[in-house]
Image (cartoon, helix red, strand yellow):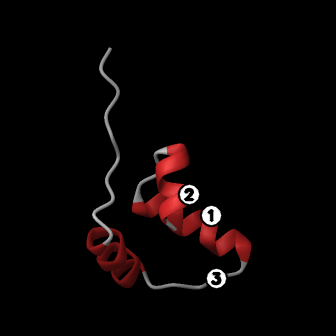
């Protein structure tokens, strides 16, 4: 989960879609809690 989020700057909602495509079913609230516990966040690009 960490590798995918860092590599492509995905938020937890996009990450959930990717995990579902891979065959992993995970609740949105649980995924958000794990996302927060890993201290992941989407880094905004300065333009």
Instruction: Choose top left, top right, bottom left or bottom right for residue 13.
Output: bottom left
Question: Which circle, 3 or 2, is nearer the viewer?
Answer: 2
Q: Are marks 3 and 1 in contact (CB under 8 Å)?
A: no
Does 13 appear above or below 47?
A: below
Question: Which circle, 2 or 1, is nearer the viewer?
Answer: 2
What's the mark number on residue 4? 2
Residue where numbered disc 3 is placed: 24
Q: Are marks 3 and 2 in contact (CB under 8 Å)?
A: no
- Label 1 environment density (alpha carbons within 10 Å; few <14, some 14–19, many ≥20): some
- Could you tell which of marks 2 and 1 lies nearer the N-terminus? 2
The residue at 27%/63% (across/down) is 39
Q: Residue furthest right?
A: 22
Location of residue 23 in the rendering, given as x and y in whole percent from the top left corner: 71, 80
What's the mark number on residue 39? none
Dot 3: element: loop
Mark 3 → mark 1, Cα distance in angstroms: 9 Å
- Could you tell which of marks 3 and 1 lies nearer the N-terminus? 1
The residue at 64%/82% (across/down) is 24
Dot 1: element: helix
The residue at 35%/77% (across/down) is 34
Name the quarter where the C terminus is drawn: top left
Location of residue 18 in the rendering, given as x and y in whole percent from the top left corner: 62, 64
17 or 6, which lies in front? 6
Dot 2: element: helix
What's the mark number on residue 18? 1
Mark 3 → mark 2, Cα distance in angstroms: 14 Å
- Could you tell which of marks 3 and 2 lies nearer the N-terminus? 2
- Label 2 environment density (alpha carbons within 10 Å; few <14, some 14–19, many ≥20): few
Mark 2 → mark 1, Cα distance in angstroms: 9 Å
Q: Are marks 2 and 1 in contact (CB under 8 Å)?
A: yes
> Is residue 32 shown left or right of residue 14?
left
Location of residue 35 in the rendering, given as x and y in whole percent from the top left corner: 35, 69
């Amino acid at each position: 989960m960490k590798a995918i989020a860092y590599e492509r700057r995905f938020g937890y909602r996009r990450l959930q879609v990717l995990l579902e495509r891979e065959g992993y079913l995970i609740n949105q609230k649980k995924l958000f809690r794990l996302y927060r516990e890993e201290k992941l966040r989407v880094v905004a690009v300065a333009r």
